[in-house]
Image: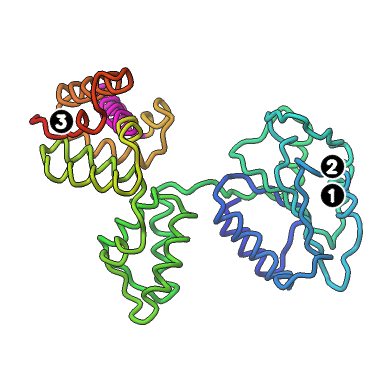
Amino acid sequence: MTLQRVLTSIRKKEYQPVYTLMGTENYLIETFKNTLKTSASLEDVDDLNIISFDMAETELGLAVQEAETIPFFGDYKLIFIDNPYFLTAEKKKNELVHDTKILEEYLKNPLETSILIFTTNVEKLDERKKIVKLLKKESQLVDVNQMTEKELIPYVSHYIESEGYHIEKNAFKQLTYLTDMNLSRVMNELNKLFLYKSDTKEITLKDVDLLIPKSLEHNIFALSQYVLDNKRDEAIELYQDLLISGEETIKIISILIGQVRLLLQVKLLVDMNYQQSNMTDTLKIHPYRIKLAVQQSRAFEKRLLGEMFSELVDLDHKIKTGQVDKELGFELFLLKSR
């Protein structure tokens, strides 16, 4: 079930005895937990009625035993079970042996005053396991997977509006770009922007650029664009800025090789009539990165991308074998006309 539908039921105090959160989006996981605590009037908790168990450190039987006891001074008890790797195909070193039969028995007749929450932090469970099949049948499955671009954009837009703020179109685009369309990162940066613009409630592109730092990967993306566009002065200036900020030339070259390789791969797949969704499956790369690579690669020929890739690989080899000074060699590469 979608998170929003589950949250609506929770706010109405229509609880399920067991929830299984499926996915890895931390912001959605925390939203579920906080909504449940608030609805059950436990947000200011006493440790007696909200208990968390890490299955990497604690046996499952202790968590189930806790669920079988009534709450103290409250209507409900929340039991969060984190890292339930026994529901997956994951193997851990020195892992605890969890007796899942105890949980199987509990699921047949769960205590009405206990709410058990499994936070899986994975996209898929091991469907071959009996306990997984039983959980899918007896618990409320909640989708907390990372949002697609089509889901994230309206979600964030609505959130900004609901908080009484307005954001410029180009500022919103820059926000999602700098956070790689990752909801947890978007919401974290929005909190900073809200605080900074609490007086006017108007968020501009200048605000986003001021408060949200560019990652090395974003700077390399810009550097590759400068090189391909023959903007040599801009490329040298950005490279010098990266050196001043403490980045290593070898690392910059390595990431740039990866970026150009991606552009070349995407270019080849476009020529083979691959859709972006197929590229994501083939290259095992986040869909948003694929989208940006497709957009960037459109303006350049395969020949140019291939030559640039070969030059970078050759330069990397020469630097590592002591044939070329790393900074001088890379600056000459940036200054070369294409």
Q: Is residue 215 left or right of residue 114?
A: left
Q: Residue furthest left?
A: 337
Residues tagged 3 and 1 counted as in contact (Cβ below 8 A): no
Q: Which mark is residue 63?
A: 1
Q: CA distance from mark 2 to mark 1?
A: 7 Å
Q: CA distance from mark 2 to mark 3?
A: 60 Å
- Residue highlighted by disc 2: 59
Secondary structure of the magenta portion, mostly? helix
Residue 53, given in percent of the width and then of the height, sits at 78, 50
Foreground tag (2 vs 1):
2
Q: Name the amino acid, label 1.
A: Ala
Packing grade of label 2 (10 A; few <14, some 14-19, many >=20) is some
Q: Quadrant of the C terminus?
A: top left
Give the extent of the magenta segment: 255-276
**Residue closest to the eye, 97 or 18:** 97
Tag 1 or tag 3, which sits nearer the N-term?
1
Q: Which mark is residue 85?
A: none
- Residue highlighted by disc 3: 332
Is residue 58 shown above or below 28? above
Q: Name the amino acid, label 2.
A: Glu
**Residue closest to the eye, 110 or 299:** 299
Q: CA distance from mark 3 to mark 1?
A: 62 Å
Residue 314, given in percent of the width and then of the height, sits at 25, 19
